[in-house]
Amino acid sequence: MIMMIRRIIYLFLLATLIVGCSKRTENLIVGEWKIEHVRAAHYPVDGMWVFYDEGRLDITKDINAIPTGTVSGEWRAFNRSIITPYIQIDGLGPKGMNGKWRIEKLTSRMLIITRVEFNDGERAGAFLRREFIRK
């Protein structure tokens, strides 16, 4: 009986930790992020991603989205493991930035994300990296 209670408590704590980490990730990501360190010729210097707390994402002047305008989609944070947070981006159109992005670094001033797979689970050709500083 005591072992069963311990297991229930451990499962509850684990579930709370997983949900809490993704919520903390969401809270840190929300805001305006200026794209930095893209090693591509003719990359717009004023590229920006804006994450809204209701799950909307606006990407402005990103060469892999729309280089001269803004495209809107959706995002959400999730954890594949207790340690590694991810965000999933969807709804950005056929040339979009859709996929599962691993969060490499997240602080109040810096965000580094890497797309590791498309939303359909395909990994081939999915690699894309973005580095940001908070605006």
Image (cartoon, helix red, strand yellow):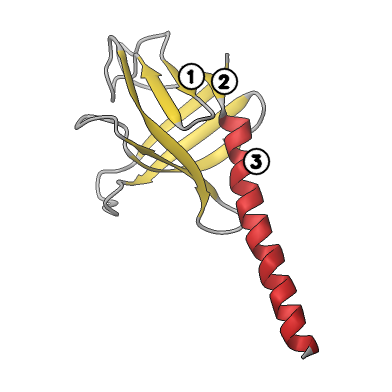
For marks 1 and 3, give the CA distance: 23 Å
Left or right position of 133 against 46:
right
* Residue name at image x 55 percent, y 59 percent: 81
- Image check: 36 left or right of 98? right
Kindly identify the amino acid type of the residue bearing the numbered disc 3. Answer: Arg
Left or right position of 52 against 1: left
Provide the secondary structure element on which disc 3 rests. Answer: helix
Classed neighbour count for the residue bearing mark 1: other residues with Cα under 10 Å, few (<14), some (14–19), many (≥20): some
Q: Amino acid at mark 2?
A: Ile
The x and y percentages for residue 16 are 67, 58
Crowding near the residue tagged with mark 2, few <14, some 14–19, many ≥20 C-alpha atoms within 10 Å = some
- Mark 1 = which residue? 36
- Which residue bears the numbered disc 2? 133
Residue 72 point in image, percent of width and height: 34, 23
User: Helix, strand, or loop for circle 1?
Assistant: strand
Residue occupying the far right of the picture: 2
Instruction: Count neighbours of disc 3 (C-alpha within 10 A) and say few if under 14, some if 14 to 19, many if 20 or more.
Output: few
Sequence order check: which comes first, mark 2 or mark 3? 3
Q: Cβ–Cβ below 8 Å for labels 2 and 3?
A: no
